[in-house]
Image (cartoon, coloured by chain):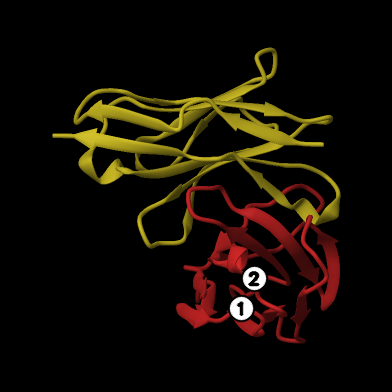
Chain colours: A red, B yellow
Amino acid sequence: ETGVTQSPTHLIKTRGQQVTLRCSSQSGHNTVSWYQQALGQGPQFIFQYYREEENGRGNFPPRFSGLQFPNYSSELNVNALELDDSALYLCASSFPSGRANEQFFGPGTRLTVL
Amino acid sequence: AQSVTQLDSHVSVSEGTPVLLRCNYSSSYSPSLFWYVQHPNKGLQLLLKYTSAATLVKGINGFEAEFKKSETSFHLTKPSAHMSDAAEYFCVVSGLGYGNKLVFGAGTILRVKS
């Protein structure tokens, strides 16, 4: 069974640029959630995708957008990067069944915005 | 709305002594609760979860947690700390709606002294 994978592992961008982060969900999981973990803080929910549709969004501006593909992999796109976007971005996959299920996390992508 | 409060940002114990990491939660309905561990430069790993079954939950690596509704607490314990337990621990709440998004506490860094 393949776990959640993310790419790239590290990324350096400058203010105003755009970035795309990628996530492959665990086999059999149809739901992907994205979280932002700033240094010294707990992860914050960005949004979730279920069967290619956005299924909930946290308190993040529209320049944070996403996609989910038919194979349930997912992308997180961030436009007009700001210094405060520097963080570890975590992807988690799950297979919800009406009651909260555990989410399986990837290793994350470390984004640095200069 | 749901939230969690981890009462200690840092906990230091000696190897072989008990570990107690404290967590209080707030939820307008019956929550699911989790403890995740994050080792340096690694992703999040699930230690244990509570989903309205037994109130005493056993997890991996000898950790356990007790759900106390009257105290709205979900403290994590381990009888004997090992050096490999040094990491950051997150208490997490999830509930119904919005695809089971996870709400993380701020984290507790556990230091284990030899």
Work out how far the residue at label 2 is from the one at label 1, CA to CA, in angstroms: 5 Å
Disc 2 residue type?
Glu
Residue under the point 76% across and 80% down: A68
Disc 1 residue type?
Arg
Residue most toward the top? B70
Label 2 CA crowd tier, 10 Å (few <14, some 14–19, many 20+): some
Could you tell which of marks 2 and 1 lies nearer the N-terminus? 1
B100 lies left or right of A91: right
The secondary structure type at the circle numbered 1 is loop
User: Residue B48: image x %, image y %?
Assistant: 52, 41
Residue under the point 71% across and 63% down: A95
Residue under the point 49% across and 80% down: A11
Residue A108 vs residue A103, the one in the foreground: A108
Would you name the residue on which mark 2 appears?
A: A82
Would you name the residue on which mark 1 appears?
A: A15
Are the residues flagged by discs 2 and 1 in contact, CB closer than 8 Å? yes
The secondary structure type at the circle numbered 2 is loop
Residue B23 vs residue B30, the one in the foreground: B23
User: Image quarter for residue B17?
Assistant: top left
B23 lies left or right of B71: left
